[in-house]
Image (cartoon, grey):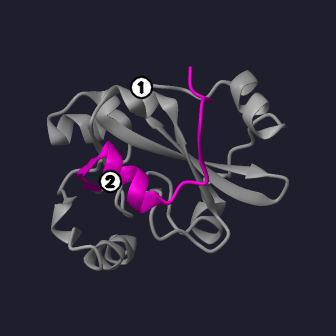
């Protein structure tokens, strides 16, 4: 299970105990919010894209969608999502478990400005029923983003 990979990653920072593994699926924003008892926009949603053969993930607030126009303005091309059946091979996690931590080599991370709304977020933690509680500052620190972007609508 990839949750072990995320736990190993956060163990080095003393934060592995913040990972929550649930009996219920938390693969969608709504499932995760209901299980955690939080607002859906406090879920940090990680979306995986292919940019000319180079993978990247964008972390957004849970209720947002990616704007094609804004994505193109930031990255020079319209977004092309990585197909679910290729996610694990390319990014390192299956659909519903993608997170911005301990990714496969070469996957760049970007944080979207929609995250500036809250101080506390729950991104996935490597499995479809796992999440980790992080402050916005911790999310930025431990995801090692290449940059902040404005691609959400």
Q: Is residue 134 magenta?
A: yes
72 sits left or right of 20 in the view: right
Camera-side residue of 23 and 33:
33
- Give the residue drawn at x 70%, y 58%: 55
Q: Quadrant of residue 128?
A: bottom left
Q: In this rendering, would 131 be left or right of 111?
A: left
| Residue 123 can be seen in this image | no
Q: Earlier in the sequence, mark 2 or mark 1?
A: 1
Element type at mark 2 = helix
Q: Quadrant location of the N terminus?
A: bottom left
Residue 153 percent location from the top left of the image:
56, 19
Return the residue at label 2: 138
- Left or right of 10, for residue 76: right
- The kind of secondary structure element at disc 1 is loop
Residue 60 in picture, x, y percent from top left: 48, 36
Rate crowding at label 2 as few (under 14), some (14 to 19) or many (20 or more) other CA atoms within 10 Å: some
Name the residue rendered at 30%, 79% in the picture: 12
Residue annotated with mark 1: 63
Q: Residue at x 26, y 56 (%)?
A: 132
Where is residue 85, by image quadrant?
bottom right
The residue sitting at 63% across, 71% down in the picture is 89
Q: Nearer the viewer, mark 2 or mark 1?
A: 2
Residue 117 in the image: x percent, y percent? 35, 26
Q: Is residue 15 visible?
A: yes
Task: Tell me which corner region of the image, top left, top right, bottom left or bottom right, holds residue 84.
Answer: bottom right
Give the magenta range.
Answer: 131-153
Of residues 111 and 47, which is closer to you in this image?
111
Q: Position of residue 17 (x, y in %)?
A: 15, 68
Residue 61 vs residue 88, the one in the foreground: 61
- 153 left or right, relative to 133: right
């Amino acid at each position: 299970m990839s949750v072990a990979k995320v736990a190993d990653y956060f163990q080095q920072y003393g934060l592995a105990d913040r990972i929550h593994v649930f009996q219920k699926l938390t693969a969608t924003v709504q499932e995760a919010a209901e299980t955690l008892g939080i607002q859906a926009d406090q879920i940090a949603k990680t979306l995986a894209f292919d940019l000319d053969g180079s993978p990247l993930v964008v972390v957004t607030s849970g209720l947002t969608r990616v704007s094609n126009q804004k994505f193109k303005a930031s990255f020079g091309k319209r977004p092309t999502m990585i197909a679910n059946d290729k996610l694990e091979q390319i990014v390192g996690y299956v659909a519903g478990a993608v997170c911005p931590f301990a990714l496969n080599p070469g996957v760049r991370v970007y944080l979207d400005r929609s995250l500036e709304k809250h101080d506390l977020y729950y991104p996935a933690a490597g499995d479809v029923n796992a999440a980790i509680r992080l402050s916005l500052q911790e999310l930025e620190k431990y995801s090692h983003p290449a940059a902040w972007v404005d691609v959400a609508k």
